[in-house]
Image: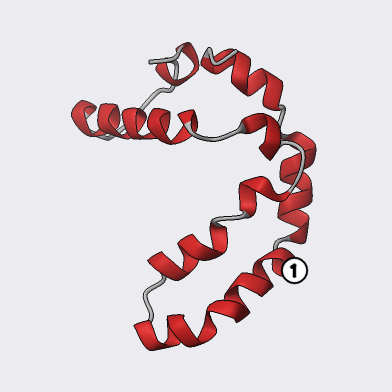
Amino acid sequence: MSDLLGRIEQHGVAQSVFDTALLDCQKRCSIIDFMRASEGDYAFQIIALALLDWASMIDDFKKNDAAIVRNSIPIRWITVRSEFVKNLKGEEVVSQMGWD
């Protein structure tokens, strides 16, 4: 486990649950291109798909409204996306995770 993830403290969660969550986080982080994410919209490309997948709504609505959801994310999240790109320091993440 990377040094960065190993320093995360947990409170009020069983150690086995916490350790499983850390391993899941490490797996997910290992496939992210943090350098690319810090330079544009890459980090937000799958958000609309995840929202459609995880939203608790009827499948027919998901199918019929998918285009609306996909197109609304860039507009509604413009400030979030801008702040994320401005503040993500891809080189630091890559270095601290030991992926350099």
Which element is circle 1 on? helix
Please state which of residues 94 and 19 is positioned toward the viewer in this rendering: 94
Q: Position of residue 49 (x, y in %)?
A: 50, 64
Q: Position of residue 24 (x, y in %)?
A: 34, 34
Residue plotted at (61% across, 71% down): 70
Quarter of the image where one finds residue 79:
bottom right
In the image, is residue 39 above or below residue 6?
A: below
Q: Quadrant of the C terminus?
A: top right
Residue plotted at (23% across, 34% down): 17
Quarter of the image where one finds residue 59:
bottom left
Please state which of residues 67 and 90 is positioned toward the viewer in this rendering: 67
Q: Position of residue 66 (x, y in %)?
A: 53, 78
> How are the colours assigned in the image?
secondary structure
Residue plotted at (53% across, 17% down): 97
In the image, is residue 4 above or below residue 23?
A: above
**Callout 1 crowding tier (Cα within 10 Å): few <14, some 14–19, many ≥20:** few
Q: Is residue 14 left or right of residue 73?
A: left
Q: Position of residue 11 (x, y in %)?
A: 33, 30
Total residue callouts = 1
Residue plotted at (41% across, 28% down): 26
**Amino acid at the residue labelled 1:** Ile
Q: Quadrant of the N terminus?
A: top left
Please state which of residues 76 and 18 is positioned toward the viewer in this rendering: 76
Q: Is residue 24 left or right of residue 16?
A: right
Q: Which residue is mark 1?
A: 75
